[in-house]
Amino acid sequence: MLMPKSILSHRTRRKESQEDSKSNMGRRRKLYCINGQYLEITDEGRVKGTRNYHSPHVVLELVPVARDLIHIRGVHTGFYLAVNNCGEVYTTMMKNEECIFREKLTRNFYDSYCSHKYSRDNLVLGLMKIGAAVTTTRSERFRKEHEGQFITMITF
């Protein structure tokens, strides 16, 4: 049985739009800091560390922007992680240039996330032992190296 051309083109368009939406999806991950905490984005938009592996707020989506550049979005909350010009970590519902991070594999096989917009300042995302999300500069990083190193854990 032959199908009308309009139905075929509608099905093709729907399939193409589904493929486009899949290509925009990121990788679902949990970012485990070497100091024993998971990076989480709470319902209020607060960024902090937690030891609760089962919290829905620790599931993040790493959305590719370009080669080695990503957005980090809380799956449960929808907030995007960002760093401002003062080096403060914050969240926003709308993507902007401050939401782009450079994902880098360190020589000891941990991942680090640096602000792309403020790359001249070498701002590296990290977690303090008390759970606060911070950025450290590369010079401070040698002193506080544990704060800015993450294991990227696959989640479903």
Image (cartoon, helix red, strand yellow):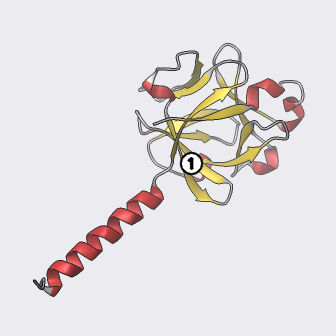
Q: Residue 109: give x, y in percent of width and height.
A: 78, 38
Residue 107, x across and y down, in percent: 85, 41
Of residues 37 and 126, the one nearer the viewer is 37
Q: In this view, does 155 lie to the left or right of 106?
A: left
Considering depth in this image, is 85 or 3 the residue closer to the camera? 3
Q: Quadrant of the C terminus?
A: top left
Does 147 sit above or below residue 83? above
* Residue drawn at 28 percent across, 75 percent down: 12
Q: Which residue is drawn at 46% across and 21% down?
A: 55
**Residue 115, quarter of picture:** top right
Q: Residues within 10 Å of mark 1 (few under 14, many from 20)?
A: many
Query: Which x, y percent locates residue 19?
Result: 39, 65
Vertical relation: 94 (above or below) 87: below
- Name the residue furthest front: 1
Q: Compared to 17, does 129 lie above or below?
A: above
Query: In terms of image quadrants, where is residue 143?
Result: top right
In the depicted structure, whether residue 95 falls above or below residue 49: below
Quadrant of residue 76 within the rendered picture: top left
Taking the spot 84% from the left edge, 31% from the top edge, the residue there is 141
On the image, the x and y values in percent for residue 5 come to 17, 86
- Quadrant for the N terminus in the image: bottom left
Q: What element carries label 1?
A: strand
Instruction: Give left or right: position of 100 versus 142.
Output: left
Which residue in the structure is indicated by mark 1? 71
48 horizontally vs 33: left or right: left
Give the residue type at disc 1.
Answer: His
Counting the numbered discs, the total is 1
* Residue situated in front as seen by the camera: 36 or 142: 36
